[in-house]
Image (cartoon, rainbow, N blue to C red):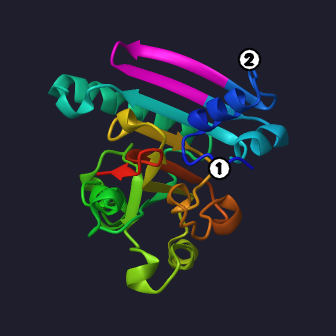
């Protein structure tokens, strides 16, 4: 296995191709590129068999990478366009696994007190939570509103519990149909910091990109689909993060 030092499936694919002098696509991996505009690009990587899994060290599934140039200085309309693209891509993956009426659990991974690792908990504070309203006051919501609950479980160093242990208890009691995990990721390029998002339907191994792998969060361990939504805020090549 290569020391890829990145969480991004497309970067891992490129590293493997360069190291093995592969000009065409790797057996077991398909790719699609889409330029939305000059500042917004989507790349979809599909790992389809065991050979693709072994080549880049990622499980079979869909990996969608959204690159947003100049996001840190983007205008409101550009940010909204990027948000619409993210919503559409996430919706496509959700539709492969659940219906719009199914309950979902959103999990914000990370340590809120450590800036490079605080994305997950901070996002949880911005989510519209609807599970309790649908249960007790459904007349106040549109009938197409998704059923959402959320948790920021903290990290092993502050709770003494593996995230998997906490989430198993939540899933067993709440019984959602899908888990959406929000976390940071590590890339190889400093240009990707705060400008690249990856969505995948294969779960996540928290901390793997920075060499501190914890227990896997996936359909295998939780019994329901786990979709990961991750933003690049660290660079493993240059050992830099925000």
Residue at 63 percent of width and 29 percent of height: 14
Looking at the image, residue 108 sits to the left or right of residue 213; the answer is left
State whether residue 91 is above or below residue 157.
Answer: above
- Inspect the magenta stretch and tell me whether residue 25 lies in it: no
Q: So how many labels did they put on this image?
A: 2
- Inspect the magenta stretch and tell me whether residue 41 lies in it: yes
Looking at the image, residue 190 sits to the left or right of residue 126; the answer is right
Q: Which segment is the magenta one?
A: 31-44
Residue at 56 percent of width and 49 percent of height: 5
Q: Secondary structure at mark 1?
A: loop
Query: Where is mark 2, residue-wise?
Result: 23
Q: 146 or 107, which lies in front?
A: 107
Q: 105 or 72, which lies in front?
A: 72
Can the viewer see residue 92 in this picture? no
Q: Residues within 10 Å of mark 1 (few under 14, many from 20)?
A: few
Indicate the position of residue 31 as horizontal and vertical percent values.
65, 24
Indicate the position of residue 22 as horizontal and vertical percent values.
76, 23
Toward which corner of the image does residue 4 lie, by quadrant?
A: top right
Can the viewer see residue 43 in this picture? yes
Circle number at residue 3:
1
């Amino acid at each position: 296995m290569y020391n890829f030092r990145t969480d991004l499936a497309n970067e891992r694919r490129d590293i493997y191709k360069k190291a093995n002098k592969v000009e065409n696509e790797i057996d077991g991996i398909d790719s699609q590129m889409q330029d939305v505009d000059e500042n917004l690009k989507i790349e979809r990587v599909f790992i389809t068999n065991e050979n693709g899994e072994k080549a880049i060290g990622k499980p079979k599934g869909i990996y969608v990478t959204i690159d947003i140039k100049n996001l840190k200085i983007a205008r409101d309309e550009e940010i909204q366009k990027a948000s619409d693209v993210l919503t559409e891509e996430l919706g496509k993956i959700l539709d492969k696994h659940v219906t719009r009426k199914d309950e979902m659990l959103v999990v914000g991974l990370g340590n809120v007190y450590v800036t490079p690792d605080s994305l997950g908990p901070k996002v949880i504070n911005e989510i519209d939570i609807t599970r309790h309203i649908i249960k007790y006051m459904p007349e106040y919501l549109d009938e197409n509103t998704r059923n959402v609950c959320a948790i920021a479980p903290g990290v092993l160093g502050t709770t003494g519990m593996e995230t998997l242990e906490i989430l198993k208890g939540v899933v067993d009691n709440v019984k959602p149909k899908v888990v959406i995990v929000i976390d940071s990721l590590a890339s190889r390029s400093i240009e990707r910091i705060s400008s690249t998002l990856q969505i995948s339907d294969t779960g996540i191994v928290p901390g793997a990109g920075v060499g501190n792998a914890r227990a896997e969060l996936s359909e295998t361990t939780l019994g329901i689909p786990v979709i990961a939504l991750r933003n690049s805020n660290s660079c493993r090549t240059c050992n830099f993060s925000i």
